[in-house]
């Protein structure tokens, strides 16, 4: 168990405070952009007004995992840069709290954030993507229904055996003033109803018309034998030759447990894409500490430019590595997570001449050489 003293709690509090502020700001920006896009879909008629906030909530759950790694990286950079500007890092270093202690404290906070990111990426993200796809499919079905049904027209189905008339279609996809003539049985059926609902069978593609509180007349014309009755619910199925509208299945909607059993490259790339988010929290935390100059007297422009370059290369190389894995450019054993080690290694090589560990090794070597020189003189 790690014991935290006053300075440790201070560092964790500062990083957590900045991290929470950055996450809130990013969520507000992303939410506003998503809300505008959803309103555009509503304006075009592709989405029901009642589903606006449900789709917005699902999209936030789907995309939160991709926001946490850059937010944590920026939080560590901003916090340590502020401590360096106020000469607090020099004071801590003079008290024996150097880079090893900073690494430990940042990783103490990075681990729970990585677990939270894993929960979003591995469980909530595919569930939200699947729910969004279901809503899109439902909207396409309703759009197909409205495109195929118009009020004030007669519809002849099944080679003239069924005649349907709909007086009005409301915004909620409800039907009113319905007249149905069905000649498919031995006796002709005439059904009249004041209201009902129409939907498509997602499996067969048949039209299902549900009528509420109407009248039914059974009998053939020219015959006096008619059966008249009232009903509360009446279901009419009209078979359709058209297949039901479906959206193509996406890898993002599959559960993580299902991706573990699928050997194809595309599914492997999707699985590693989800794993990359929590791993990026740890990698970026380790990457951020050496990118901050401890002394405020030294120019931090070079390290700041290196931090920006490493940030953009990290996430752009992630997309490239996943594409290479999916299309077979890189071998399957190599996977797509190698870019995190590559970025980490390149940055540390660039900063190696000024690294804490190299300076410490030089000091030990000098002290060892001086002591050996004194002994030889004696």
Image (cartoon, rainbow, N blue to C red):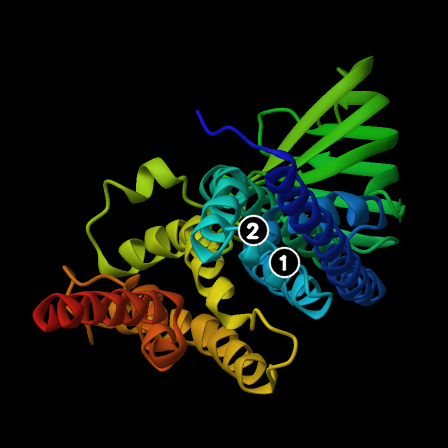
Q: Where is residue 83 in the image (x, y as percent from the top left)?
A: 68, 61
Would you place residue 174 above or below residue 370 in this image? above
> Does any portion of residue 126 appear in the rendered image?
yes
Q: Residue at x 58, y 25 (%)?
A: 186
The residue lying furthest to the front in this view is 378
Q: What element carries label 1?
A: helix
Q: Position of residue 368 (x, y in %)?
A: 20, 65
Q: Residue at x 23, y 40 (%)?
A: 261
Q: Position of residue 364 (x, y in %)?
A: 26, 64
Viewer-side residue, 181 vs 242? 242
Viewer-side residue, 300 vs 134? 300
* For residue 235, side relative to residue 354 (left or right): right
Q: Which residue is drawn at 56% across and 32% down?
A: 4
Q: Which residue is drawn at 84% across and 45% down?
A: 166
* For residue 246, side relative to residue 357 (left or right): right
Viewer-side residue, 196 vs 367? 367
Q: Do the residues labelled 1 and 2 touch (CB within 8 Å)?
A: yes
Badge 1 crowding class, 10 Å Cα cut-off, few under 14, some 14 to 19, many 20 or more, is some
Residue 283 image-quadrant placement: bottom left
Task: Please name the residue that numbered disc 1 is placed on.
Answer: 91
Q: Position of residue 122 (x, y in %)?
A: 44, 41
**Mark seen at residue 82:** none
Q: Is mark 2 on a helix, strand or loop?
A: loop
> Does any portion of residue 249 appear in the rendered image?
no
* For residue 100, side relative to residue 42 (left or right): left
Quadrant containing the N terminus in the rendered view: top left
Task: Please name the residue that numbered disc 2 is placed on.
Answer: 95
């Amino acid at each position: 168990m790690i014991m935290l003293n006053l300075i440790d709690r201070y560092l964790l509090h500062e990083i957590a405070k900045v991290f929470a502020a950055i996450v809130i700001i990013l969520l507000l920006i992303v939410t506003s952009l998503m809300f505008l896009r959803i309103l555009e879909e509503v304006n075009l008629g592709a989405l029901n007004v009642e589903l606006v906030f449900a789709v917005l909530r699902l999209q936030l759950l789907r995309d939160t995992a991709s926001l946490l790694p850059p937010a944590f990286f920026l939080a560590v950079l901003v916090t340590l840069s502020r401590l360096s500007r106020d000469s607090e890092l020099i004071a801590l270093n003079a008290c024996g709290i150097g880079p090893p202690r900073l690494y430990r404290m940042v990783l103490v906070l990075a681990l729970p954030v990585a677990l939270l990111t894993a929960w979003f990426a591995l469980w909530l993200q595919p569930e939200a993507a699947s729910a969004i796809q279901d809503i899109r499919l439902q909207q396409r079905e309703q759009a197909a229904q409205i495109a195929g049904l118009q009020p004030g027209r007669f519809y002849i189905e099944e080679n003239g055996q069924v005649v349907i008339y709909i007086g009005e279609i409301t915004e909620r996809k409800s039907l009113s003033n319905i007249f149905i003539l069905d000649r498919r049985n031995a006796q002709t059926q005439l059904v009249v109803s004041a209201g009902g609902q129409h939907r498509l069978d997602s499996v067969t593609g048949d039209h299902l018309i549900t009528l509420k509180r109407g009248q039914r007349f059974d009998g053939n014309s020219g015959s006096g034998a008619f059966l008249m009755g009232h009903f509360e619910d009446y279901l009419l199925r009209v078979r359709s030759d058209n297949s039901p509208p479906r959206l193509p299945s996406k890898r993002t909607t599959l559960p993580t447990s299902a991706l573990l059993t699928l050997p194809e490259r595309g599914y492997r790339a999707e699985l590693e894409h989800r794993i990359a988010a929590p791993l990026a929290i740890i990698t970026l935390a380790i990457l951020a500490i050496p990118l901050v100059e401890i002394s405020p007297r030294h120019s931090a422009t070079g390290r700041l430019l290196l931090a920006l370059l490493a940030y953009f290369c990290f996430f752009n190389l992630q997309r490239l590595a996943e594409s290479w894995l999916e299309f077979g450019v890189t071998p399957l054993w190599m996977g797509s997570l190698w870019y995190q080690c590559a970025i980490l290694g390149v940055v540390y090589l660039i900063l190696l001449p000024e690294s804490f560990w190299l300076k410490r090794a030089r000091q030990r070597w000098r002290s060892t050489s001086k002591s050996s020189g004194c002994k030889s003189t004696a």
